[in-house]
Amino acid sequence: FGSSHPARATRPPPTRWRIPPKHAHLAAMAVPSDLLWECVKKNNAFMRKSTNMKTMSAERGNLLGVHSQKFSGLANKALGLSTKATGKKVKIMLTRSSTRRSRTYRPKTRTSEMGVKRNTKKATEQLEKLMGAGFYRPDLLALAKEKHSRIMRSFKKNRSAAKKKAAAKK
């Protein structure tokens, strides 16, 4: 089908790799993680400095809370385990970067949270499925399992202190 319209004849054929004009600003924003870390490592809002201690980080996606490139949720894919109180119950939440590329540029939706099982065996399987088999930060899998076990240990009541309290009341 030939077209006699001059504007249609000069338009280039559509290509798959061309960035649509309304999303052109997103292509310019893709920054390597090494460069991003170099920009934020000396000064950012999440750093917590203290004398005679390592510099800590309060980032939402920082697994250990240590200020380093490996654990940074700003420079890498975010990964964090934390607790969330909902009424009387306390849940263990896994924070990770969103899988949708468009959400990485929106701070509110950059990370997503999902619940983790409290049963250690089931939680281990769940973390292995998400991180190991899903290829999502498999380098932090052992640390995530350790943190989960520490969180579970923190939920346990100190029974010896409860016995001492009961004995003091009598």
Image (cartoon, helix red, strand yellow):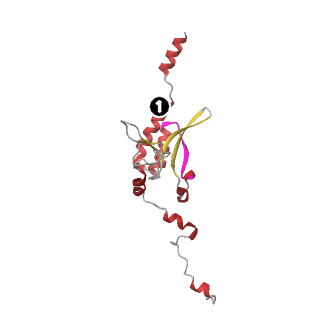
In the foreground, 31 or 44: 44
SS type, badge 1: helix
In the foreground, 27 or 150: 27
Question: What amino acid does circle 1 point to?
Answer: Arg
Residue reaching furthest to the left: 52
Q: Residues within 10 Å of mark 1 (few under 14, many from 20)?
A: few
Q: Is residue 158 depicted above or below 67 in this figure?
A: above
Q: Is residue 2 left or right of residue 153?
A: right
Q: Is residue 18 depicted above or below 31 in this figure?
A: below
- The quarter of the rendered structure image containing the N terminus is bottom right
| Percent of width and height locating residue 16 | 52, 73
Q: Is residue 23 depicted above or below 65 in this figure?
A: below
The quarter of the picture where residue 13 lies is: bottom right
Residue reaching furthest to the bottom: 4
| Percent of width and height locating residue 60 | 50, 45
* Residue visible at 49% across and 40% down in the picture: 123
| Percent of width and height locating residue 91 | 56, 37
* Residue visible at 51% across and 25% down in the picture: 157
* Residue visible at 37% across and 37% down in the picture: 53
- The quarter of the rendered structure image containing the C terminus is top right
| Percent of width and height locating residue 107 | 55, 52
* Residue visible at 41% across and 42% down in the picture: 66
In the foreground, 83 or 125: 83
Q: Is residue 112 part of the magenta span, yes or no?
A: yes
Q: Mark 1 points at which residue?
A: 153
Provide the residue span drawn in magenta: 109-120
Q: How many labels does the image show?
A: 1
